[in-house]
Image (spheres, rainbow, N blue to C red):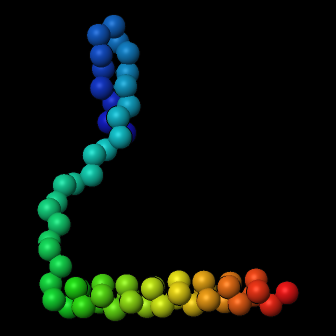
Amino acid sequence: MPYTTEEGGRLNNFANEPEMYQAEPPNSTDKRNYLILGALGAILVGGVITVAVYASSAG
C-alpha cells in the first residue's frame, strides 16, 4: 500500500489511481448491435406494459 508521510509524522493511505485511457468511438458493427439491442429492449418493455394492462383489466 502506498503511504505518504505528512508533517508531524502522520501517515496517509491513498488508493491507487487506475490507468487512464481514451475511449474509442463505436464502429459500424457496434452501432448496429446497439440498435438491435435497443429495439429488443423496446419490444420487451412494450410487452411487459401490454401484459400489465391486460392483467389489470382481467379482474
Q: Quadrant of residue 56?
A: bottom right
Residue 14 position in % (x across, y down): 35, 35
Q: Is residue 33 left or right of residue 42?
A: left
Q: Quadrant of residue 5?
A: top left
Residue shown at 34% from the left, 92% from the top:
36
* Marker count (numbered): 0
Residue 32 position in % (x across, y down): 24, 91
Residue shown at 62% from the left, 89% from the top:
50
**For the N terminus, which image quadrant?**
top left
**For the C terminus, which image quadrant?**
bottom right
Tell me: residue 2, above or below residue 35. above
Residue shown at 33% from the left, 7% from the top:
8
- As drawn, the residue found furthest toward the right would be 59
Viewer-proximal residue, 54 or 29? Answer: 54
Residue shown at 66% from the left, 89% from the top:
51
Q: Is residue 27 left or right of residue 47?
A: left
Q: Is residue 45 left or right of residue 20?
A: right
Tell me: residue 39, above or below residue 3. below
Residue 26 position in % (x across, y down): 18, 79
Viewer-proximal residue, 3 or 25? Answer: 25
Viewer-proximal residue, 13 or 26? Answer: 26
Tell me: residue 24, above or below residue 15. below
